[in-house]
Image (cartoon, coloured by chain):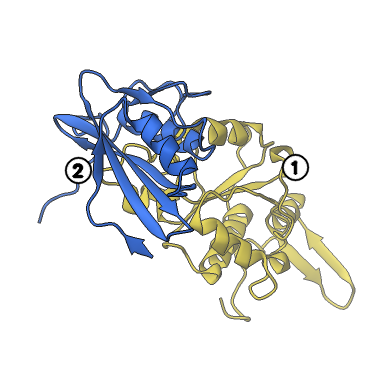
Chain colours: A yellow, B blue
Amino acid sequence: MAVNEKILGAEGIDKVPGGGFVLARTEDLFNWAKGASLWPLTFGLACCAIEMMVTGGPHYDIDRFGSGVFRASPRQCDVMIISGTICIKMKESIQRLYAQMPEPKYVIAMGNCAISGGIFYHDTYSVVKGAEELGIPVDVFVAGCPPRPENLLHGIIKLQEKIRTRKEKTA
Amino acid sequence: MEQTPGWVTLGKDALKPVVAFLKDGPGAFISLHCLTGVDRKEAVEVVYHLYSFEHRVMLTIKVILPNADLTIDSITPLWAAADWLEREVYDLLGVRFAGHPDLRRILNPDTWTDHPLRKDFKMAGVVPKPVK
């Protein structure tokens, strides 16, 4: 994303010329705020969790996108980054934690295992073939094994764009 | 480290006294290096690896259990490490260890009744890798 590229979803926000005023629809303003402060749930399962931790570290710094606050309680989170292999023993926990997150909530499936079972798709009796199989609606898929930190940041940026441009569901 | 070539096969009843002698006797095999099992279709082998720091020797002991009677004495009273290792052999191969303080599944869900590492294990939903 270049610096002078148009920011999707910012069409509703207008700077009033000459002064320090901004005119905006509350919907657009709230969507911007939602995207800029996505608090992730600490949900590292396997190797992708290490990449997620590095993304939170000083070099790749997820905090500059507003997502530096990883909370352990699902009640305080906006986004669940499912990073790692989902074993069948973990199925119940994921479903319960997702149900406990308050709306509006989003899910990023990080890594091949969370997308479709990854290299464990064949011949394994104990791995769930992707987060979608658990009935959890995924917003952004970040592919990789593991995806690089820049890749995860790209996923977060895409999620921010999605939040700003889509109509919010009411249910 | 010297690895004794091959292995020693013991009978089921001979295992515990022999292993106790190896541990407390002059051999000083105080370390249980590993405890696993192998499914050889007609029988299941339980394999014990013992290591002696004093003499720097690793000893491999196998006990062959017939499919009809997969029980053996637990060596958890001798080595605390055997606790989880025996639970793993029970979970994946179905070998019951008599005298184990807490024999339950360790890796698979508790509701399972099957043992995945047996050769005749089949499960619906396992996608086989396509052969080129």
What's the residue type where badge 1 is placed? Answer: Gln
- The residue drawn where x is 24% and y is 48% is B7
Helix, strand or loop at disc 1? helix
Location of mark 2 (residue): B128
Q: Position of residue B81 (x, y in %)?
A: 51, 40
Residue in the foreground of this view, choosing between A114 and A13: A114
A31 left or right of A45 in image:
right
Could one spot residue B128 in this view of the protein? yes
Helix, strand or loop at disc 2? loop
B9 left or right of A103 in image:
left
Indicate whether A118 appears above or below B120.
below
What number is the disc on residue A36?
A: none
- The residue drawn where x is 73% and y is 48% is A71
Residue in the foreground of this view, choosing between B22 and A111: B22
Residue B10 figure quarter: top left
Location of mark 1 (residue): A76
Question: Which part of the image, by quadrant, shows the C terminus of chain A?
Answer: top right
Q: Position of residue B24 (x, y in %)?
A: 49, 41
* Numbered disc in front, either 2 or 1: 2
Residue in the foreground of this view, choosing between B76 and B119: B76
Q: CA distance from mark 2 to mark 1?
A: 41 Å
Could one spot residue A129 in this view of the protein? no
A48 left or right of A26 in image:
left
Indicate whether A66 appears above or below A170.
below
Q: Position of residue B55 (x, y in %)?
A: 43, 59
What's the residue type where badge 2 is placed? Answer: Pro
Q: Chain of mark 1?
A: A
